[in-house]
Each structure stands twice: as C-alpha cells, then as structure tokens.
Image: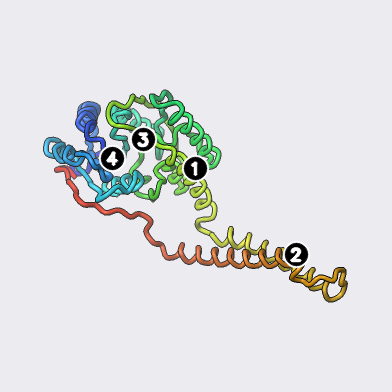
Amino acid sequence: MQNTPDISVIIPLLNESESLSSLQLWIDKALKDTVYTYEICYIDDGSTDNSWEVIEQLSKTHPTVSGIRFAKNFGKSQALHAGFEWAQGAFVVTLDADLQDSPEEIIPMITELKNKKLDLISGWKKKRYDSVVFKNLPSKLFNWAARKVSGIRLHDFNCGVKAYRAAVIKKIDVHGEMHRYIPVLAAHEGFQKIEEKVVQHQARQYGKTKFGADRFFKGFLDLVTLWFVHTFGKRPMHFFGFWGSMMLLIGFIFTLYLGIDKLFLETTGRLITQRPQFYIALTLMILGSQFFIAGFLGEMILRSKNKLNRYTISEKIESYEH
C-alpha cells in the first residue's frame, strides 16, 4: 500500500467495546475490493469499558488501524478534532461506532464528492430507528432551527456519516460541542459546496444512546453561539459598541432632560434622586459603559488567538501504513 492513503476513516467512540470488532469487519468488507487505499483511526473518548483493549487487538491484526486514547472524556468534538489532525487521506469520512451507520455508504459518498466536485457530503438518516419522543422529534426540531439560523438546507446536521475533502477538515476548528454544526463551520470558512445524501440507519445492537435532554438544549444554545460568533466573532465591538452607544445616548438624553427641568422649568418640587428618570439614566449609562468594556475586551481576546481545543492523550497506536 502507498504511504498516503486515499481515504481516512475517523471513528470517535465512548464505551462501544461490543460493537468495534463487528464494525471493523464491516468496514473491511465495504472497502477491501475497491480501488481506494484507506486508514482507520478509532478515537477513544475516555471509555470506562474495555474499548481501548479491543482497539489494541484490532491494531495488531489490521495494519490499517490506528488508535488515539483520551485521558478522560473530553467530548465528541474534541475526538473529531484529534482525528482530523491525524488524518492523512485525500478524503476523510466520519462514522459513529455504534453500528447504526453503514460503512457501505463510504464509497458512494466519495464518488459523489469527486463527480460533483463538492467540499462536503452530509448523511441524512431519512428513516430512523430511534425513539420518536426522545430522539426523533427533538432531532427534527433541532435541524429545523439549524436550517433557519444557518441558511444551509440540510435535513440532518448531526448525522455521524459525513465525507469531506481533506482541505475542509484541516481548515475548520471543531471545539466545545460544535461537532453538530460542522457543515455550518465549513460554510463559514468558504466551503460552500455542501450537499446531503440519504443513508441507511440501523437499530442500535449494543449499549445505549448517549443522547439526552441536556444535549438537546445544549445543541440549541450552541446554535445561538455559532450564529453570534459568525456574525460578530471577528468584530465584537460592532455588537457591544452599538448597544453600548445606544444605552449611553438614551441615558444622556434622560440626564439632559433632568438637568434642564431642574434648572429652568421646575415642574415638580421633588429632588432629582426621587424621580424615576434619574435611575433610568443611571442604569443605562452604567450598562452602556459595561457594554463598551465588553466589546473592548472581546477585541483584545480575539487578537490573543488562544487555542480553543483542550484534551490530553494518554496513549496512541500508529498503524503500519500511517
């Protein structure tokens, strides 16, 4: 095999020891008779079962297999980020490790990526085998909101099956919980050729889903964050400065009114501090100043260019071809 593979398969996982051997056989079956060379990297995101031991065994019997083990659970976004840094292939494919994603989708997605000269193809689990109340309905609401906010017309932003050109994953910065919005992050970096493909979805065979109500709400909060960062991330003073200026202006108008009324009109006998306009003016001017300071600090932080990804790798396996 050549040193640089055609396809890099990235598989983040957490406590999926029962499914890994079956998944490896499925991937090999789907890719072994194709014209493409490939490498596989399992990223163990702090599993507490024997997932890492299974990965070690797979690496001994499959020369295409590599592994990265986190010291603790850092999250799927960090796992994908580590995999993207590791990948050497011209095309990169992500799969979930729970056997619900079919490796047989890899070659058709790569073919479509090449033929249409796309940057990214996202899977669409049109027919799902998940709980309607606890996963399907929240997923539909989440994807509807993501379409409205981002303007990207995908039905399933969070599908684990995605195929990319290498240039895309080397450019985007996946951190926090932003793995749900990789197509949006790619579009923000100028990779606008994004399409989706209907993919097969299987019922979970082992373990239990990692999806919960907290992840549903975090997804919406991350969507708001992504919109704000995209709109004002490179110009925080435009947001905070605008609202700070408006507050200061309104506060100054109230202050001017109180001064003129006290000095020249004397419409009431009350002290200035007894009038509600005084507290409105004071509150607005304090908030306006704070907004200005927030905008200034945002500009300073933006220029510091601190890294956002934080994870610690405790062990690593390199494949013979990597």
Q: Quadrant of residue 131?
A: top left
Q: Quadrant of residue 62?
A: top left
Query: In front here: 205 or 120?
Result: 205
Q: How far from the left and from the top, in percent, is residue 51?
A: 21, 39
Q: Say which residue label 4 marks.
A: 14
Q: Amino acid at mark 1?
A: Phe
Cα separation between marks 1 and 4: 23 Å
Q: Say which residue label 3 marks.
A: 160
Question: Given the current orientation, which residue lies at the most extreme left position?
Answer: 60
* Numbered mark located on residue 277 in the image: 2
Q: Residue at x 27, y 29 (%)?
A: 206
The answer to which of marks 2 and 3 sits earlier in the sequence is: 3
Q: The N terminus appears in which quarter of the rendering?
A: top left
Q: How far from the left and from the top, in percent, is residue 121?
A: 40, 35
* Numbered mark located on residue 220 in the image: 1
Element carrying mark 1? helix
User: Quick check: can you spot residue 21?
Assistant: yes
- Say few, some or many: other residues with alpha carbon within 10 Å of mark 3 (under 14 / 14 to 19 / 20 or more): many
Q: Amino acid at mark 3?
A: Gly
